[in-house]
Amino acid sequence: MCTSDDCNKEIDRRTFLVGTALAAVALAAAGRVAGQPAPAAPETRVLDDPKVQRETVTFQYSGKDTFDGFLARPVAEGSYPGVLVVAGNRITEEYIPNTCAALALAGYVGLAPNIFHTLPESAKTPAEMREATKDRTDFDVLLDVQAGADYLRQQPFVRAGGFGILGFCYGGRIALLFGNRSRDIDAVVAFHPGPVAAAEVARLNCPVQFHHGTADRSVEASETQKLAAALKARDTPVELHLYEGADHGFLAYTRPARYLPEAAKLSWTRTVEFLDRHLKTV
């Protein structure tokens, strides 16, 4: 478990500010011409599935304040393995709640802590986001993720034992850092993670699965290939999946210019199979 003291010792608060990763965030709202039929729902959208129970939850933050998160779990009674979902931007972008819902359909409790809870609504552009988060570091975000893990551990519908963690972009970087520092994590899935130096994950020994597009214009696939090779050299179990022609955010159906349905479906199938092997058999 990553305690505050551990994090203070191990995380350099001066490096890798959250705002740096936000430079990669580029959201495009696709408008519809009047009179045209509504587009078909994306194949990977499962947010409204009746087998999923969804809710907004609230955590303790620094022992006094609160921040929010999105939780999805199976409607069927029982206890299920927990998986933390770490976004690369605001969790209100629908593909993040949808990821939690997809986890619930696969037999997990998916929880996305709102690691951008300090970001004011007035910050819209990447430059504004960078400015608003310039004093917020990986240390602060890891404490938020830990609050999410602590919340999961207390829920009667979450199975006792280890958790998985899944992250996108900057959230992929945080997923790797958290897996390196937390004994609670039994599996890490990172989609096109922000750059991570091998030294930053020197203690990461749980299984890791990477997904990266070969045409990623925000984080080059070679960054992930280099990290995967370094982890393998230390005998960390690693799976690396590359998707030919896929850009950054290819799983995000909220970004039509980058969403690739076939790569999205394949990567999700691989993700669930990976989590099943490492979370449902322990």
Image (cartoon, rainbow, N blue to C red):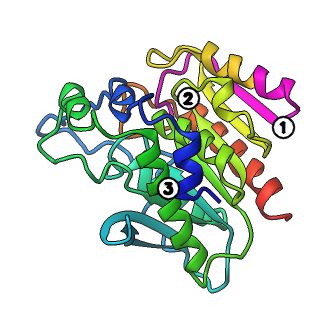
Q: Is residue 265 above or below residue 200?
A: below
Horizontal side, residue 226 vs residue 257: left or right: right
Front-most of 63 and 165? 63
Nearer-N-terminus badge (3/2):
3
> Where's residue 165, x and y in %?
61, 51
Foreground disc of the pair 1, 3: 3
Residue designated by label 1: 237
| Magenta residues (range) | 229-250
Residue type at mark 1: give it.
Answer: Pro
As helix, strand or loop, the secondary structure at mark 2 comes to loop
Residue at 52% from the left image edge and 59% from the top image edge: 146
Image quarter where the C terminus lies is bottom right
Disc 1 vs disc 3: Cβ atoms closer than 8 Å? no
In the visual, does 180 lie left or right of 37? Answer: right
Q: Which residue is mark 3?
A: 145
Q: Is residue 143 above or below residue 128?
A: below
Q: Secondary structure at mark 3?
A: helix
Disc 1 crowd, CA 10 A, few/some/many (<14, 14-19, 20+): some
Asked whether, in this view, residue 36 is left or right of residue 141, the answer is: left
Give the x, y percent position of residue 172.
55, 38
Name which quarter of the figure residue 132 lies in: top left
Q: Rounded to the nearest whole Å, what is the CA distance between mark 1 and mark 2?
A: 18 Å
Q: Nearer the viewer, mark 3 or mark 2?
A: 3
Closest to the observer: 166 or 265? Answer: 166
Mark 3 belongs to which amino acid?
Answer: Val
203 vs 160, nearest the viewer: 203
Q: Amino acid at mark 2?
A: His
Question: Which of the two marks, 1 or 2, is nearer to us in this view?
Answer: 1
Q: Secondary structure at mark 1?
A: loop
> Looking at the picture, how far across and down is residue 242, in whole percent?
67, 23
Label 2 belongs to which residue?
Answer: 192
